[in-house]
Structure formats: structure tokens, C-alpha cells
Image (cartoon, grey):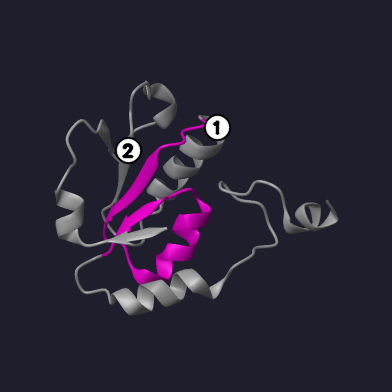
Amino acid sequence: MKLLTTHQHISRPEGLQVLELANDADPRALSLAGVDRIDLHFPSFTDGRAHSQAHLLRRRLGFAGEIRATGDVLADQLPLLARNGFTHAVLRVDQDLAVAERQLARFRKHYQGDAVQPQPHFVQVSR
């Protein structure tokens, strides 16, 4: 997962098709043709609807582009964000980048499957 500053998030490359998805929007009802990046917003760190949206986009809809977490994104949310299919996170301004990087490195493998690696660990090991 790539960590971004607010400034890096605001600057948008030319020709990039970006979709900003509201928390109450159903990703299954959208056309994702030509979309390069989807921004999912966390209005509060306690609001987990963007996690469900990211999981739907990756697993059910097969979206292979960038999924970016924006809003009230804390360092301790990063491992779960990565497991649910987010590729980038824009940390809240008061979050320490070094702490965030340590959080991402904390768990390398997970026993359960997730949006990125659907097979559980015991299936991966037995192959």
C-alpha cells in the first residue's frame, strides 16, 4: 500500500479517470468502464462503509485499478485497508508517517483469505 500526503492526493495527473464514491453508494450500480482510480471516503474512523465498498469492488466486481482511502484515515486502520483492497491511503494530517509504515509492516501473512488474497493461508501453504 502506498501512503500519500494530502498534497499528493490533491494533485491529479492528466488523463486519469477518477471516480469519487459516496459512502452510501452501491458500487454494483456503477459503470466502471474506463475508471482508473476510485476514491472512497471515511468521514469518521468509526464509519466502515468504505471497507465494504472496497471489498465489493475487488472481489465481486473485479476492479483492478487504484482504490484510495481518503478522509479520517488513521495509521492503525492501514492493515485492514490493505486486506480489503485499498492500494493507496491519504493519512489524516496528524498521523505520523513512520508509525503508519510500521503498522503496514506488522503483519506479513494472514490465516484468513481477504480481498487481495482470497485463498486462506492453509490452502496457500499446501500447494
Tell me which segment is drawn in magenta.
62-91
**Residue 73 showing in the rendered view:** yes
The residue nearer to you, when weighing 92 against 12, is 12
> Which residue does the image show at 18% across and 59% down from the upper left?
6
Using the rendered view, name the quadrant where residue 109 is placed. Answer: bottom right
Determine if the magenta segment contains residue 89. Answer: yes
Q: Residue 75: x, y in percent?
A: 36, 70
Q: Say which of 95 and 1 sits in front.
A: 1
> In the rendered image of this protein, does residue 101 appear above or below residue 67?
below
State the residue at coordinates (21%, 62%).
Answer: 5
Disc on res. 37 = 2
83 lies above or below 33? below
Report the amino acid beneath label 1: Arg
Q: Is residue 108 above or below residue 21?
A: below
Question: Residue 24 got which mark?
Answer: none
Residue 81: percent from the left, percent from the top?
44, 57
| Callout 2 secondary element | strand
Q: Quadrant of residue 67?
A: top left
Asked which secondary structure carries label 1, the reply is helix
* Position in image of residue 47 (x %, y %): 36, 55
Q: Position of residue 16 (x, y in %)?
A: 24, 33
Relative horizontal placement of residue 82, taking residue 110 as reference (left or right): left
> From where the camera sits, is residue 24 visible?
no
**Residue that mark 1 sits on:** 60
